[in-house]
Amino acid sequence: MKKPAVFRVPESIFYGRGSFENLGSQAALKGKKALIISDNVMDQLGYVTEGRALLHVAGVQSEVYLGIASEPTDKYVSEALDLFKSEQCDLVISIGGGSCIDTAKAIAVLAVNGGSIGDYLGGKKLAQQTPVPHIAIPTTAGTGSEATDVTVITNTFNNVKMMIKQPAFLPDAAIVDPLLTVSSPKNITAATGIDALSHAIEAYLSKKAHPMTDTMAISAMKLIAENILTAYNDGGNLDARERMSLGSLQAGMAFSNASVCLVHGMSRPIGALFHVPHGISNAMLLPAVLEFSQEACVERLADIGRIFRPDIVSGDGVKAAEIAVQSVKELCRKLNIPNLKEWGIDGEAFEKAVGKMAADAIDSGSPANNPKVPSQLELEELYHICYDYHFSSASEKV
């Protein structure tokens, strides 16, 4: 008999055009002084100023931390936590991509449970006290972090991305306003969109998938497959932006409850050692990992193939699975996703790091959820394949 499944989501989710307007009223229910975690780009676009104005009208004071300049690190967490405490805040609000949201998650937990963020890795330390309230406001359709109980923070001492998962890291409220994603440039739209697609695909293929995560993953894949190219080629298309935001949100719900797999396990070391943004590294890896996994998940991949090609109603599952892999590859090509070599990673440096990356990927636990679990040597070979992978042909490499 299977263990009972769990499905956790934020207490409140506000979704749709103009939902940002709910920030003030929601914040007033949760605190009196907020620390906004964001970055300089969001500030320049006016989103931070708009957020502070909404808080002011609702009678909530605010301070701002704009130090997020890369994927989240333990240093950002430490700096923002010091500001939270010195300003005597009682509420955290994140406005931005996954880096801002993940940093805010760490602040919300550490502010009342103490310790450093690394203490929580692998469940060594569990959050015993209710975290500070956190309202997450994504400005990209990608990470889905607004709906997950996972934070990924880089340990700057050993260059390891720490994936930390506990219910305490789940935001109290998510505000998903697709109007905030319109400003995303094409490269960010592509990277975050494929990131969201990888979340949905891995949630569906995960050994921990269950009917509720399947429902969200399938819906997310449909929304993303049907709208990502439109959002990429016509960033002002609000219908496409709205559907991408919903797809990203649903993908976040799916993988938070089903876990991610091999793509994410391999992606984190690349980000930690070579500073490749998370969405891009996922996109670089996704097709090759699907090829590696195909023989162990033909029927599930066939379902995905039918999402990309609705005309395939039934028939050969192997063919439909191959169509899934080829469709993802073709999508990456159309979105101009580079391989690791094209990104600019030095071949010699990459070769020296392959062993560590494979070991770190295994240690993260995510590859164990994959339909086909790789050995250390298989992981090393997969990294080599991905280094100069060609997205236009199943049998070619650059």
Image: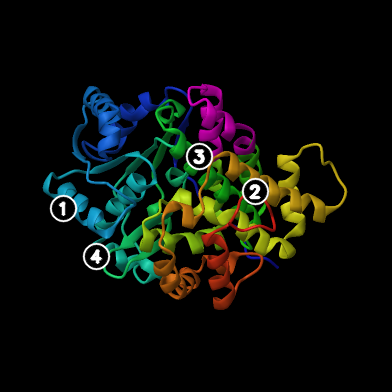
Comes first in the chain, label 2 or label 3:
3
* Left or right of residue 397, residue 139 in this image: left
Give me the disc on residue 392: 2
Amino acid on which disc 1 is placed: Asp
Q: Which of label 4 and label 2 is nearer to you?
A: 2
Mark 4 — residue? 115
Which contiguous range is marked in magenta? 223-248
- Tell me the CA gap for discs 4 and 3: 37 Å
Q: Outermost residue toward the front?
A: 398
Distance from Cα at disc 1 to Cα at disc 4: 13 Å
**Label 4 to label 2: alpha-carbon separation:** 48 Å
Q: Which amino acid does the dot numbered 4 rest on? A: Gly
Q: Earlier in the sequence, mark 1 or mark 3?
A: 1
Q: Is residue 157 above or below residue 203?
A: below
Q: Quadrant of residue 97?
A: top left
Asked which secondary structure carries label 1, the reply is helix
Q: Position of residue 4 (x, y in %)?
A: 62, 61
Q: State the mark number for residue 82.
A: 1
**Which residue is found at the position 54% from the left and 45% from the top?**
194
Identify the disc placed on residue 190: 3
Which mark lies nearer to you, 2 or 1? 2
Mark toward the start of the polypeptide (1 vs 4): 1
C-beta proximity under 8 Å, tags 4 and 2: no
Assess disc 3: are there few (<14), some (14-19) or many (≥20) residues with their C-alpha within 10 Å of its C-alpha.
Answer: many
Q: Nearer the viewer, mark 1 or mark 4?
A: 1
